[in-house]
Amino acid sequence: MNSRLLITTSLEETWPNDFKTPVYFLGEWCRIYNRKERWSKMDARVLPYHWDDRNKLYNDYLYLNNVYEIMLKYLKYQLNGIHGVDYSLRYWRILIGPWLAYFMQMVFDRWSMLKHAFEKHEISGCIIIEKDEKKLIPYEMNDFLSAFVDDDWNEMIYGQLLDRYWKHSTNIEYVTKINNQLENIHQDNGLMKSSLTRFKQAFLSVFKKKYWMKNTDDYFFFKTYLPISVENEVLLRLGQNQKRWETPHIPKIEANMDMRKWTLDKYNGLDEFENIIGSMIPMHIPTAYLEGYKSLVKCIENLTWPKTPRCIFASNGIQTLDLLKAWVAKKSENGSRLIIGQHGGYYGIGLWSFLEEHEISISDRYLTWGWSEPEQPKVHPVGQIKSFKPIGVDHAKQSTLLLVTNADSRYSYRMYSYTVSSQWLEYLEDQFIFTENLSPMILNDMTVRLYPSDYRWCQEKRWSDRFPNLTLDEGEINISELIRKSRLFVSTYNGATYLEAFTMDIPTVIFWNPKHWEIRDAAIPYFDELKQVGIFHESPESAALHVSEVWGDINSWWKSKPVRRALDKSKSKYCNIACDITGNIEAEIRAESNIYKFL
């Protein structure tokens, strides 16, 4: 077997200067589409992706969940000691849990690919970029979210693993790169609640007469996903005015390498990967949890947010906003009850998801759009929180076929049943096959909505090269306007889009590869019924054939009794709008508030 140079990312500084040197690309993430003129001339092979084996992906997810619990426990003791506090495991789970799980899953993926490369192939060497790694340590969670989709950050992770574990078994060349510092991506959150308009003031005045008002802050609502009118009404029924909460910047504290001279790989009984991740966590943990922790604590102490809220209700931000997480963690320690609302699709449907499990685990009560889990007593269905409704358009009189697509990072970052990393290319090919199977008449009226974040997949160029005359939308047109002009809406992934389309009563066709979008057993009967009536398809050819069959008379299909029955069942389970969302949420908050009284 001939040996080859190993290339880990798309950074061409790590590629050979000639086209003759035989190379292995570690994955498709190395080959940027608009750089095809270079990599297509190379003597190159792309290594298979280890998580194309979906059974391995799921088993690795279960394994990593166990490792996560081990490392979280060790970090609890470590960080409590460093900061001179004595907080519970739940406190640290709320604050650092999302970062820890993401980071562990990423490192495991990068390490697994390197391990496979060296065990199964002859590697002649590799080229690593020398970096000031201190500059790539994120300030906080949102910095991290922007960093890990970038080639620089991933090349650093690959480089550290190679330098530490394969230095003595392969030839490593070190090169420099100019301007390799990641830009600061911490964005101004501004004010999450705007001033009340005259209409809202009038709304309040009416309800003040009906509900007794208390000048308290028993209930803290933050990014609930509720329409503002519903959120106001719930608060008023609870006897409280809506407030505007300021969200100041978290201080950006530079990494201090002297504070990072500790490790989690010192414990007995750890396996190979546990030792690896235990040694890497101290070098990568965001400064907000280490050097900047005291500043973060001071920041939340100076907030104008409630001091002793009975209940905290949030749907979004509890995963990413460190200011909110730190405040919620502290209030939870003091007995405040945490209610989290479902904030998108996929929940309750996908076979596995770290975020769903994490949100349920940190909450006292979890509110869903309609689904429940018998083994999860915290889960309470209340109805679709975003509350989409029909927009009053006769879609049968419209002319456009709207295909809404998805994209995700070239590098894996969290584990749930979806297209991971380079599997997106298979997903894209399914979109192309669907399009090729449509009639020219339908193609002339088709708009493809590209995903707003490209992740260097070059979506627009790939589509244009394959279909030069197709109408593409890269986000220039408001999605509501596109929907308003659509005769038929085509959803291509397990997310919120098709659920929102259901509640808006837009004729909808769904298709995805079931090998990439595995669903849980409880959801299968609902999708089987959607399949029987032509809404859900497991191949692009089947979806395209159905679109062609119903295109001339959409209403005869969409308004038929079998379709309505299947729709009503799925909507009741996963996007229920036929219930009293205001009353349901009020009741859930009051129930949790009553628990607070007895603590």
Image (spheres, grey):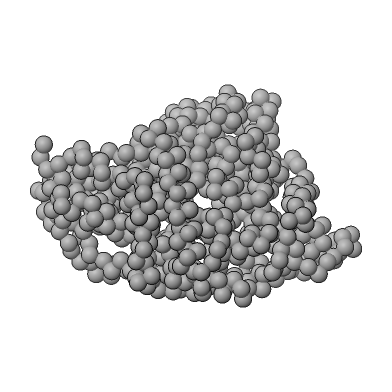
Figure quadrant of residue 308? bottom right
The tally of labels here is 0
Spot occupied by residue 269 in the image (x, y as percentages of width and height): 36, 45
Q: Is residue 206 visible?
A: no
Spot occupied by residue 413 in the image (x, y as percentages of width and height): 41, 50
Residue 283 is left or right of residue 223, and the answer is: left
Q: Looking at the image, which is closer to me, 263 or 391?
A: 263
Residue 386 is left or right of residue 152, and the answer is: right
Could you tell me which residue is drawn at 15 percent across and 49 percent down? 169
Spot occupied by residue 194 in the image (x, y as percentages of width and height): 67, 69
Report the quarter where the N terminus lies. Answer: top left
Could you tell me which residue is drawn at 24 percent across and 69 percent down? 178
Q: Looking at the image, which is closer to me, 137 or 564?
A: 137
Could you tell me which residue is drawn at 47 percent across and 53 percent down? 72
Report the quarter where the C terminus lies. Answer: bottom right
Could you tell me which residue is drawn at 59 percent across and 26 percent down? 525
In the picture as drawn, the residue positioned furthest to the front comes out as: 268
Residue 556 is left or right of residue 130, and the answer is: right
Q: Looking at the image, which is closer to me, 593 or 240?
A: 593
Give above or below for 495 relative to 82.
Answer: above
Spot occupied by residue 22 in the image (x, y as percentages of width and height): 13, 46
Give above or below for 550 relative to 89.
Answer: above
In the picture as drawn, the residue positioned furthest to the right comes out as: 209
Q: Is residue 373 visible?
A: yes
Give above or below for 178 relative to 535.
Answer: below
